Amino acid sequence: MTPSDPRVVVGAAIVDDTGRLLAAQRAGPPELAGGWEFPGGKVDPGEDDHTALVRECQEELGVLVKIGEQVGGDWPLTGGYVLRVWLAKLSEGEPETREHLALRWLSVDELYDVPWLPADLPVVRAVQGRLDESRTG
């Protein structure tokens, strides 16, 4: 990694067989607590994005995921970070609240029933487009 490379945070847009999206409510830090996000976290040195995303889903939710296509590109975050999000399906386990305050499965019509963190909101809109396509396609 060179000094100009962004620091990467990965997120999983986990969609179930009925087309619902899993949202996770942050427990901390205080400035983000209570906001809703995609499960995931920072990519560790030596990890690629997919390995980090699988690890984060195991740690945070107790599940294994199968990673699909990326949603958009690099979504800017504060502090020189970028968010990279992939569609994902559960391959093993049921999500558990381990590091979050709550988890919620949201249908396309419920996507905005929770207060998403501002950085995640444009990604939610992009995921909504994918879910809408799959409903009508």
Image: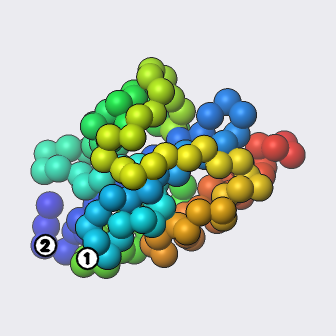
- Considering the numbered disc 1 on the image, is that residue within a helix, a strand or a loop? helix
Query: Quick check: 75 above or below 40?
Result: below
Q: Which residue type does callout 2 highlight?
A: Pro
* Near-viewer residue (17 or 112): 112
Residue at 28%, 72% in the rendered image: 30
Task: Point out residue 66 in the picture as x, y percentages from the top left corner.
Answer: 47, 30
Residue 127: which disc?
none
Q: Is residue 34 above or below residue 69?
A: below
Give the amino acid type for the residue marked by disc 1 in the picture.
Answer: Gly
Which residue lies at the image location 52% right of the left edge and 51% below the top edge? 23
Counting other residues with Cα less than 10 Å from the Cα at mark 2, is it few (<14), some (14-19), or many (20 or more)? few
Where is residue 24 drawn, in percent x and y? 46, 52
Q: Are marks 2 and 1 in contact (CB under 8 Å)?
A: no
Q: Residue at left 19%, top 74%? A: 4
* Residue 3, label in figure: 2
Q: Is residue 125 left or right of residue 136?
A: left
